[in-house]
Structures are given as structure tokens and as C-alpha cells.
Amino acid sequence: VHETEIRMTAAQAIVLMESCGDMHETKRVGAVAKVLPQLTSVKEAQNLVKRVLSTSERFSLRIRLGALYFPLLGLPTNHYALDLSKQIDRQALIKLAEVAQAEKQFSKSRSGRGDTSQHGNWENFRNEWLDGKATILTSHFFQTMPQKGKLEFDYVSTSRPTRGTKPMSDRRYQQLVAQIARDSRTELRLPDRSMAGSRRRRSVGDRWELVRNAVRFRKFKKWIRDVKMAAEIVRCMPSVHNGKTETCRLLFPRLIDIEHFMEIFDALSFAEKQECARLLGWLNILNPQQPDRYYEFDLSVREEREAAKIFVKLAVTEPDDVTAEDGPRRTGWLTFEYTSDPSRGCAAVPAVRQELLQRVLCGTRLYL
């Protein structure tokens, strides 16, 4: 079955594993790793992992599959560092390309919004580097994929929940937070066994990795109800090792009310805000209906220039100090604070703000 064109459901995979004697605890992680790419959908993959593996075994599965784990389980938003000479990394890239193509086609034909990509090509790949040189990942790259090389990039999924999606309840959310704390305390007490015979205690980076993994793997595709839940988790994370910005990246695709993401953004330090925008993209996080804050845009960067155009449009229709006669320049830095405060002679124009939603991710049309 492994590496064939055979496709199956989670139930069929379990029957196959049972018939092959692979349900024993010493074998099932390896068996799931082999059969997972053959399942018919992300939902079936999630069902198989939840029904067969314990939490600790899911960690083992993550290690075994490497980067392939994330697109297979419907968690493609991540930072990827791939070695194209390794088969498992090539598999991960091919699977991610399939996800990217599906999301690209939806964005272009059914989302009801504009292009929010970094390069103006509707792709969700960002910040790409091949062997230390900046590159752009497109369908052509995957058709002529090199046999070796170090490829590093960020991927930000633009998929949104269907209309009427039920979020995690308050009770389940509190259970999740409590379980994360328990898992982290238990794991952090353990010595690092990666070095034979060593009792070395885990570094700060190791500790953050444990907390991050606990959040990531505890529940698959469990939608967080609102940014207040996400903000509570972000506040608890360390600033060192990009803890807060990595948590923002982790939680971003799970938010139902993504239009309020900037409330989380506002609680970050300036450096963290810049990193968060670099990882996720200004056009993915902005909401023209809630524009009031300080901004710095590098006009030599396409997506930041496109973000600046949103404020140019607002500035010429709403009384404010942000003005531009011919649109923003293509070089230099644009820094300003936007306000809708009536006491400062400002006034929002709701119709214009609603129209500008079509330029950002939170303006995506939701389907049943």
C-alpha cells in the first residue's frame, strides 16, 4: 500500500493494520506513518490518528514524518526547512504543493476577495530561500524540482472555516489550557535523552518547543472561538525564542473571528509586530474596519505597498492626516498613526471600509 495509488478511509486503514498485526503499541506508529499518505482526505487522516494513537505516540509520529506531518494532518501553516535530497522532505513539499494549489484556486475563483500573497501570484508561500538565495515558489518550481538543495520558507494557509462552524467551548478550552500545562510540567521535568548517557536539562529553546508542540498536537482543527482565547495563550508564552510570534502563527489558522486578529497583534512589542507581519503577511492580518493604530510600511515590498494603498483609500474618503496625491511611492518607508477619533476631527466611512475588506483575508466569502 505504501507509495501506491491506493486510497482508503480511516476505518479501512484500521482494518488493514489489524489484519497485518500492526496495532501493537510497538508497531502502530510506524504503520500509521506508512498508511497516512494513502488516506482519502485530511479528515480521514485526523480520524485515524485520533482513533489509533495516544498523545505521546502522536509526538513520535511527528518526529517520524518530519515536515510531512503538517500538510497530511491539515496543519500546513508553518515554517519549513527542507533538504531536497531527502525523500521524506520531497514528499512533504509535494504534498504541500497540492494543498497550495487547491487554496490558490479557491482564492482566485471563489473567495470573493483579492490577492493577499506576498509576491502578487496568489501563492501562500512566503519568505522563500533556496541554498541561501531568495526565490519564489510557483507551479514551475514543482515541475522542475531540483534533486538537491536546502529550501526554507513560510506557508500561511488561507483556508477559512465554513459558515456555522462550531468553536471550542469554554469548558473544552479550559481543559486544553490545563492539559497543556500538565503536559509541559511533566515533560520539562524529564532530562534530555537525546545524548546517550546524558542528564542534561533542557534549554530554554527545548522548553518552548515542548509547550508549542503541546498546543499544536493536542487537538486537530479545533477552532478557537475568538481572539480573547488566543490572546490568553499568547500572553502566557515567552518572548525569547520568538515564543509569542510563533504562537501567533500557530493559532492564526484556527481562529474563527480572524477579523479581530489585530487585537492580538496590538499586544505585541514593536519588534514582535514586525516579525508577526513578516511571517503572516500584512494583507492576511489587516482589517480595514479596525484600522486605528501605528504603522510602518516598507514601500519597496509589494505587499506592504498594497497594504499602504488601503490607507490611502481611507485617507482620501475619511478626514485624517494621512494624504497622498498619486498613491504611495514605490520606495522608502511610510510611517503614520491612523485614527478614527471624532475628537480629532476624524470620521469613519463604513461603506468604504466594507469595500476595502475585499483586499484582505478576513474579507473571504464563507460557504456552508
Image: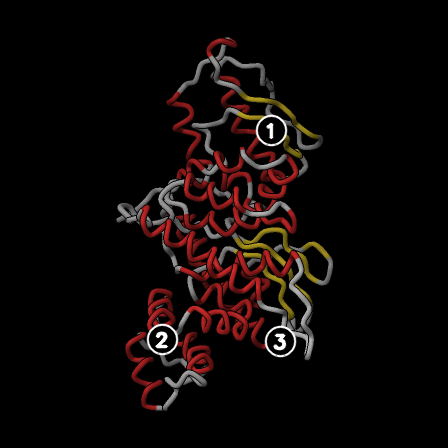
Q: Which residue is mark 2?
A: 52
Residues tagged 3 and 2 counted as in contact (Cβ below 8 A): no
Q: Is residue 141 left or right of residue 95?
A: right
Q: Residues within 10 Å of mark 3 (few under 14, many from 20)?
A: few
Residue 4 percent across, percent down from the top left: 43, 82
Disc 3 and disc 1 in contact, CB within 8 angstroms: no
Res. 172 mark: none
Residue that extends furthest to the bottom in the rendered view of this protein: 20
- Mark 2 Cα-neighbour bin, 10 Å: few <14, some 14–19, many ≥20: some
Which residue is the site of mark 3?
Answer: 86
First reached walking from the N terminus: tag 3 or tag 2: 2
- Mark 2 or 1: in front is 2
**Tag 2's secondary structure?**
helix
Drawn side of residue 41 relative to residue 80, left or right: left
Asked whether the beta carbons under mark 2 and mark 1 sit within 8 Å of each other, the answer is: no
Amino acid residing under circle 3: Lys
The reply to whether residue 112 is in sight is no
Residue drawn at (56%, 54%) of the image:
125
Q: Amino acid at mark 2?
A: Val
In the image, what residue occupies the spot 50% across and 37% down? 264
Looking at the rendered image, the quarter that the N terminus falls into is bottom left
Q: Quadrant of residue 348?
A: top left
Residue annotated with mark 1: 295
Residue 203: quadrant of the picture: bottom right
In whole angstroms, how far apart are the C-alphas of marks 3 and 2? 28 Å
130 lies left or right of 158: right
